[in-house]
Image: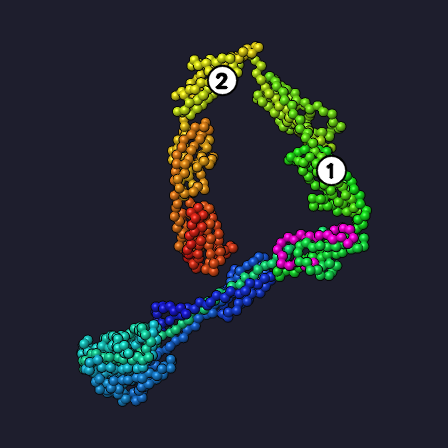
Amino acid sequence: MKKTWFLCLCSFCCSTIYIHAGTPITHPSQAICEGSSVTLTATTLGDSYLWTPNGETTKSITVQPANNTDYKCTITKNGSSSQTGNLITAGGFEFLPSSPITSAQNKLGDWINYQYLNFDQGGVNINIGACTTSQNANNVKPSYFSNLAPHSGNYLFVCDGGNSSDARVWQARNLKLKSGVEYQFSCFAANIDSEYLIHGASSLAKLKFVIENQDGTSDLLQFTVPTTLGQWQEYKATYTPSTDMSWCHIYIVNFTTEPAGNDFAIDDIYFGTTINTQDDITDEFFRVNVDKKPTVSINDQNVCPNDNVTLSASIVGTYTNISWLENSTAMTDHTTSITAKAPSVIGQSNLYDIFVTNGTCSAVNASASVKAIDCNVETVITHTINVCQNDTLPITITANTVTGTFLWDTGETTESIQVPINEPSSSHTCTIIDNSQITREVFNISTEDCHSEKSSTFCMTDCIKLSIIRDYDDPSDITFIWNTDPTNNDSTLIVCPTEINNTYTCQVVHNDNYNSRELVTFNITLEDCSETESLTHDTIFCEGNDVVLSSLYPAMADSYNWSDGSTESSITVSPQSETIYTCVTFIDTNYGYTLYETFNVQPVSNPIIDNIETTSTQADIQIINGTAPFDYIVDDKHYTSQTIDDLTLGIHNVRIVDANGCSTIGDFELVSHEIEPMVFFSPNGDNLNDRWLVKGIEFYPNAIIQIFDRFNKQLAKYNGSDPGWDGTYEGHGVPTTDYWYLITIEQLSKQYSGHFILKR
């Protein structure tokens, strides 16, 4: 029981509020088959019901979910209130002067004793220091007391104040109070001294309400009656005991000692409280699991009499049980495959039924027959196939028999199959059963290397006619496919090569022989047939390095003459700016050959590492100078992008090589970054703290973040690169409470765990 106190704003009462949250109830899961419905009933009695997620407000609901679904029913039992009432039941002074109340029982069953100072039972012309009750103050002393009717009821309490200090005018004794409960006190008082203007303010009655218990006395309320005659004034106070009190006295003390004046009236003394109980709320949780019906199929089989055959069912979906019938008789098998048997009589069949169930769903079934056929009637057809060997392309073989059931030695059941032809020889068999006729077709496949190659040399600038000359049985069944011109299906191709070394291929496809393919290769080499030649070489090199310039014929020439005076086949130079070098090479052939070579040599700048920006897993290397693209080599591993991911913490070496082969080196260091999960968030759609985020997780995109509720149920799992958690589970917002996280950062070999608050 949780107790909460609230400020009281009414005159006589305040409430002690008791809030009770019922213990949640989790019901056992229920299972239904898809398409079925189930009724969920709350077991807690209440005044109102609210179901989540469908919003119904009855004690029972009928649902038909398509998938596994969780439901919650919130049951509210309205609170109640009870009042202690006025614990001082005689505080209204409703009694004749001749019959004062000295004891009365209050609503709690306690007997309260009442005492009065010098109570005058005559009720008129009372002495100084005496008190009585009356229907009007003026009736008691017409010459001295003003006219004043009771505040409520028929009687009021009247006192002629005396000169006795701290006189106890009235007492209520033996009240029993509870610790921690706030009690409200109030009373109405009035000045009845008709000669007040003569006697002055010092004659006004000064009253004090005092509480006395085992711990001593304490002032409850202290006041001076109002100056205006015949006007009631309310006075209020509260009192909260720190311990339970088995007895307590409340009394009025008049500490005005003036014999003249000092006259007052009291009415409607109240002392009590009110106890309210708030609504009692209980949550009941239900889960409905939906079982799905599987689908099943099975094929008929034809086998020899009394032969066994394996029947294998194809089942799509989840299932919990399998059973079989053989000719309507239950079998002991409970697997997807069984051993079936053909009858002993040719032409007869055994019928097999499979029944598959899943959970609460009714069984689905399929049937197949195993027929006995005459296996003595068999025809064998042999096919001999000679094709060109190919390591990548298969061929398609097709049975000639067009009706019946097909079974290849590969297990396939179609009329045609594809088989590889990368071995010198192979064999495949297809068994076709058509009623009682059995045909076996055997395909014996042999291969040969059909590749042929021709190499020739021609002068540069020549155009060449390539031709495939071969006798074929039927040229119309041949297709020619050239690698440089696939649209040309002729046996000849005219080419004009520009490179020194050239290769042309043609696939000769035999359409009448399983598309078997021959490969014909032409290797064409070009040579310069002229006696003189001029060549220009554009050479670049990395500044600060040397570059070697070599003649086109570094070993076979008879002489070399370079522009710098060198006579070797090559020279080493290192110019500071773009420079032209020439070389004349002479070869003493039958006709003589002179080569004039010009070398345009240009130094290029090396790449420079301008800056390296790093995170805990990534480095961004910024390059100036050099020629793109760049090869980024980090710790001997090559990258093509300047942004390097998935790096470990620590120091890394980097080498940059540009498109010209120029390079530079450097290093950098990766350090870890701390993370800081949010301690709370409020996914209420106001775009403020709508997602639970982890500060610094952007440095660990591969981190794994898991969210759990207080029952250790995982509600979410995502990576550091994903958006934060939006406070939902399976599309529904979760309630306000604490949730736990587990963050695994494999790169740091660390796990972080803790909890946070979701507020809605």
Residue 319 is one of the magenta-drawn residues: yes
Residues 87 and 539: in front is 539
Residue picked out by circle 2:
551
Confirm whether residue 637 shows in the render.
yes
x, y percentage for residue 546? 42, 22
Extent of the magenta region: 301-324
Give the tally of numbered discs: 2
Quarter of the figure with residue 17: bottom left
Q: How is the image coloured?
A: rainbow
Whether residue 172 sits left or right of residue 54 in the image: it is: left
Residue picked out by circle 1:
444
Whether residue 472 sits left or right of residue 523 in the image: it is: right
Confirm whether residue 724 shows in the render.
no
Quarter of the figure with residue 340: bottom right
Q: Which tag, 1 or 2, sits closer to the chain's start? A: 1
Tell me the residue at 80%/43% (across/down).
379
